[in-house]
Amino acid sequence: MDSKIVPILDILSKEYLGGAYPGRNSEGLNPEWPADPFHVLIATILSQRTRDDNTRKASDNLFREYNSIEEIAEADPSVVAELVRPAGFPKQKGAAIVECCKVLRDEFGCCVPSDTEELTSLPMVGRKTAACVRSYAMGIPSVCVDTHVHRISNLMGLVSTRNPEETEYALMAITPEDRWNDINRYLVRHGQVACLPNHPHCERCKVTRYCKYYEEHGPGKTGENRLVISQTADTRPDARGFCRHEYRRCRHRRAVQVQSGEG
C-alpha cells in the first residue's frame, strides 16, 4: 500500500467535510434530491462532459418535474432534453436517460442494480458512472475515477497512468478498500477548490507535502511552474474533461464520447 494516500484522504476529509458527489456544486451546496441509487445514477449521467454547477442545475430541473424511474420512463425525451440542457448534449442525454429508465422499469423492476456489469449495460453508463452509483448511493467500496481524480492522482505522483481505467485499478492497489469511497469524494472537491485544471492553486492546498507537482514546481520555482502549466495547457484535461486542442480539432467526437458513458 502507498503510504501517502491515506494521510492525504485524512487531511482532505477534515478540509472538505462532506466532500463532493454528482449534483453537489462547486460551492459545496447539496442538491435538492436524496442521494439514493436512482437520483445518483441519473445525476452522474448528466455530469458527463460538463461542469459541476451545470450538473446541479440540470439534475434539479429534471427531478422537480420527474422524480421516479416510472415518471422518466414515460416522459417525452424532448421535454427531458430541455430540462437537462444546462448539462450540455441535451438530445443525447435526454434520450439516454429516458431509455435508461425504461430498461430499469422493464428489466430490473424499477430498481437500480448494484452489479457493475448490469449497471454498465444501461445506456450511457460506463465504469465511472457505475462506480459513483455503487459508492455514493449504495455504500459499496468503489473507486470512481473522473477527470479530477485521474488528473490529481497523476499530478501528485500517486499513480502514473494514461487513462481513467488504469487510474482506477492503480488506486485500488495502493488504497485500503475501506477508503476507496473517499477517493472521489475528496479529490473531486480538492479539484474544485484548490487543484484546479491547468492552474493548481498550491497556496490553498493542505497536502503539498505529499505532492510531486509541488515538490518540483512549488515556491522558488515560480518560473518553472508557469512554464509547465503553459506547456501542458493543451494536453491536460480542462474542467469538462477535454483538452483544448482536442476540443478545437475534434468537437464532433464529443457526442460519441458522451454516448459511451465514459465522460
Image (tube, grey):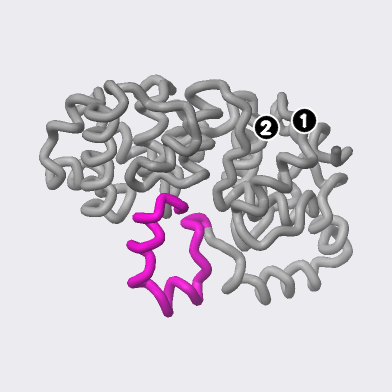
Q: Are marks 1 and 2 in contact (CB under 8 Å)?
A: yes
Give the CA distance from mark 1 to mark 2.
7 Å
Question: In x, y percent, where is residue 231?
Answer: 67, 76
Label number found at residue 104: none
Q: Which residue is mark 1?
A: 176
Q: Quadrant of the N terminus?
A: top right
Q: Amino acid at mark 2?
A: Trp
Does the magenta segment cover residue 93?
A: no
Q: Residue at x 60, y 52 (%)?
A: 165
The residue lying toward the viewer, choosing from 220 and 197, is: 197
Is the stretch drawn in magenta largely helix, strand or loop? Answer: helix
Q: Is residue 27 above or below residue 234?
A: above
Q: Quadrant of residue 39?
A: top left
Does the magenta segment cover residue 260?
A: yes
The residue lying toward the viewer, choosing from 33 and 172, is: 172
Q: Quadrant of residue 10?
A: top right
The residue lying toward the viewer, choosing from 42 and 115, is: 115
Q: Which residue is mark 2?
A: 180
Disc 1 element:
loop
Report the side of 153 relative to 237 (left or right). right
Report the side of 155 relative to 39 (left or right). right
Question: In x, y percent, where is residue 38?
Answer: 35, 26
Disc 2 element:
helix
Question: In x, y percent, where is residue 194?
Answer: 66, 46
Report the side of 125 relative to 104 (left or right). right
Give the extent of the magenta segment.
Answer: 239-263
